[in-house]
Amino acid sequence: MSTIHHSGTEVSELPVPEAGSGSELRDGIRLIAIVSGIYVGLQLISNIASLKIGVVLGLAVDLGTFCYPFTFTIRDLAHRVLGKRGVTGLVFTSFGVNLAASAYLALCAIVPGEDSEAAASFSFVFSPMWRLVAASLAAMLLSELADTQVYHLVRNRMKNRLWMRVLLSNAVSIPIDNLVFSLGAFAGVLPWNVVWEIFLFNLIVKAVVSVIGFPLIYLIPKRFDRI
């Protein structure tokens, strides 16, 4: 595995085979592309789905809740193949893509359509509620950056305990995400008991999915680790 030195610290680069074959390098690049693409895609789908507040098991919940938690597992995979700076860049990239998508959908919604009824339906569904969009993006950015900091702080102290890094970082980022989104999107708009329901349901679902998806972090071969 090749390395570079930055400010006196040795940092792993992409995995490069010792014998000179390019197959492992290509595999590493392909893995990075797959993990990054799935992460950004799931973030985008989740933010669009969160525009609808549904009722599940008698509790109010934004419907992005059932998709978004899978980004935690993908992000934990990204920690392994990208490292701290790489994941930070990925988080900001996802933020930019989601912001651009919201702006473009807003533009599409105001353009007159040939079929006025279809155009009105499109506008009704896809016109962003900017407070909700802002809350969702702020929650994503703050929680993901907090997760990255905690993950690598724990990594520096417990280098051989991958499970501990994942569980502790998620334990910090999930409540932050829920709190920022629930208050930012719905405080003063919905009754406080509904806001509490959204917070609680999101917290439970995200925690459960995080635990269920936890073993998947071991899918990546150790040779691709940058950490």
Image (cartoon, rainbow, N blue to C red):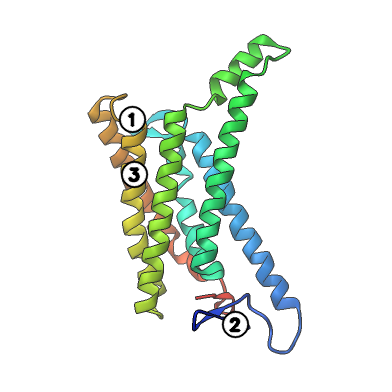
Question: Which is nearer the eye, 218 or 152?
Answer: 152
Q: Would you name the residue on which mark 3 appears? A: 178
Element type where label 3 sits in the image: helix
In the displayed structure, 217 sits above or below 96; it is below
Expressed as whole percent of the image width and height from the top left, the position of residue 211 reads 38, 59
Q: Quadrant of residue 201?
A: top left
In the rendered image, the vertical position of residue 45 relative to residue 147, given as above or below: above
Residue extending furthest toward the left: 193
Q: Which mark is residue 186?
A: 1
2 or 3: tag closer to the N-terminus: 2
Please state if 1 lies on the left or on the right of 188 as rendered.
right
Q: Amino acid at mark 1?
A: Phe
Residue shown at the point (50%, 41%) measured from the top left: 46
Q: CA distance from mark 2 to mark 3?
A: 38 Å
Seen at 62% across and 19% down, the residue is 110
The type of residue carrying mark 3 is Asn
Q: Which residue is mark 2?
A: 3
Q: Secondary structure at mark 1?
A: helix
